[in-house]
Amino acid sequence: MLALFRSFMKSKIGVFVALGFLALIALAFAAADVTGSHQFAGVAGGDRVANVGSRRISTSELTQAAKNGLQQIQQDNPKANMKDFIAAGALTTVLDRLIDGAALSVFGSNHGIAASDRLIDSEMAKIPAFQGPDGKFSQTVYKNLLMQRGLNEAAIRQDVADSLIARQVLVPAAAGARLPRELALRYAGLLTEKRTGTVAFLPSSAFAPKGPPADADLAAYYTAHRTEFTRPERRTIRYIVFDDSVLKDIPAASEAEVAQRYTTNKALYSPSESRKLTQLVLPTEAAAKAVLAELAGGKSLEAAAAAKGLATSAIGPATREGLVTQTNGDVAAAVFAAAQGKVAGPVKAPLGWALLRVDAVIRNPGKTLEQASGEIVTALVAEKRRAAIGDFAARIEEALGNGSSLGDVAKQLALTPQETPPLVADGRVYQDPAKTAPPVLARVVQTAFAMEREGQPQLAEIVAGKQFVVFDVSRITASAVAPLAEIRGDVTINYNAEKGAAAARAAAAKVQVAMKQGTSLAAAVASLGVPLPVPEQRELSRKDIADKQGRIPPPLALMFAMAQGTVKALGAERNAGWFVVSLEKITPNPIRADDPQIGEWGKQLADLAAREYQFQLRTAIRAEVGIKKHQTAIDAVSRQLNGGS
């Protein structure tokens, strides 16, 4: 599991990336992970883990950032826990990212780069956790969330300001990054070279012990590998779903309201006429008249246009008023004076001289108040229902903020709460991964796993303005190591796999020795005297590797880190066995200077250069503003997160 954490922290989608500050803050708000409370302010070593220029990073900031990072990892690996997170060095990475963010903000402030209150407000309005049922920023939701989560408004605004300043500082540093064309040519040569090699796989199962292990050996293995048998955190969600069917008294549309709506939209119900047109625009009036003469001779507008290398365009249906806006009054007057099938013009249009054929005349007789009454009533009732359910949801949300329970809401709605089976963080059912949480909970599972304790009901929108869910967590089962007695079979499988992997590694070493003495890979594998898969010869280029976007099998990737004529061994994941890789030939592929792909390869290099520029800028900024870490406080936070005192 430590390897999982390390690979995640080094990956492109790690916990914090240089330009991901704002996205992470939004996620943290949604998960209730950003807080200005000082629940760890009293840890031994002081209340700050680092000073960045004139700014300090508190112990509580580091604590919350670490929790946020762990929760992100748990989306992919529900078994992840804080102990392994820290053991993998992730706490150091999290602190470095916090220091980077603070340093960028201090640097920006020192050089007149700021984020105004209005800009901060605009960014905060985009955070989903602060939006009401209508999808817009809700002051009520915002205040309730602050109260429920103990969030500090000043700290939230500072985090958003930091992210905005970071963007202003870092984005220009990467703008216009370019590298010489000669470098792109060399890079292209590497991408297109081909490598030929042979891969043998020595599965652990072929070398594993055949009988069950002794009880003492199994117990010792279980003790040494306890974290591998950690059960993920599970949460049971209670919920009720409601829509506008819970509304009892929706006022009917009155005659006065219908009349008012009819008057307000009088243009919609008045008689109108629109026209569908085919237009040809020519550069001069003389050219337009010449085409008009051709039309009089029987030629179509399309044919006349094609003969001159031009094309017609379709317009409409357009009203007179719309055509005036789209073109001008002269065009509209000419078109509406022409009969269906006739050509209006030439007339001066914004882009030249236009000929317009009237393809269809569409007349709308309009509707009287009596005729339009039915559709107006339907629209008004729908609006009243939407407004009523929105108000109803807002009242429920306010009640939850004032301490009402999910049971109270269920009683008010005369609904019976439903309950999920235990779920893991990605929404799958614990011990039955083929099943997931009900679709109505798809958008709230992440929020449920961010709740600090049981019985904290929240309201969420399922279908905008129509369907809502009230939910809470009724039971939290913390992540813990499973007892050996319950998982003896799984531990035995892992024990035998590890023993088999060790034997497979020794066998791979024997194969390497034999090959150095001139034996072929196939013959060396056969000499082991164990039934094994036949070695496979593979040929591929670096471009093949790049096209796989990280999904290339490790032994094939290893071929591109080897020298020609060498043999290397590589362990498979999860003690599955060992690979022996022999690289037999490297075939260069010269690139022409006019190869059309050089531009794309140059762009890839430019992207790498842009990221390097940003990294170097962050490094220089840290040096300029001055960084001082307080290891005693950092160690104290680490102990607190690990459950120590």
Image (tube, rainbow, N blue to C red):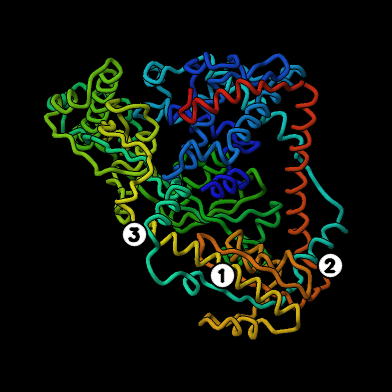
- The one nearer the camera, 137 or 273, is 137
Circle 3 crowding by C-alpha within 10 Å: few under 14, some 14–19, many from 20: few
- In this picture, is 436 found above or below 185? above
- In this picture, is 167 found above or below 308? above
Q: Amino acid at mark 3?
A: Gly
- The one nearer the camera, 274 or 426, is 426
Mark 3 vs 1, N-terminal side: 3
- Mark 1 and mark 2: span between their CA atoms? 49 Å
Q: Amino acid at mark 2?
A: Asp
Q: At which x and y percent is residue 626? A: 76, 21
**Numbered mark located on residue 489 in the image:** 3
- The reply to whether callout 2 and callout 3 are in contact (CB within 8 Å) is no
Determine which residue is flagged by label 1.
Answer: 504
Say whether residue 45 is left or right of residue 197: left
**Numbered mark located on residue 594 in the image:** 2
- Mark 2 and mark 3: span between their CA atoms? 62 Å
Q: Secondary structure at mark 2?
A: loop
- In this picture, is 591 found above or below 375? below
Mark 2 vs 3, N-terminal side: 3
Q: Residue at (57%, 62%) from the top-left corner? A: 551
Say whether residue 329 is left or right of residue 362: right
- The reply to whether callout 1 and callout 2 are in contact (CB within 8 Å) is no
- In this picture, is 107 found above or below 30? above
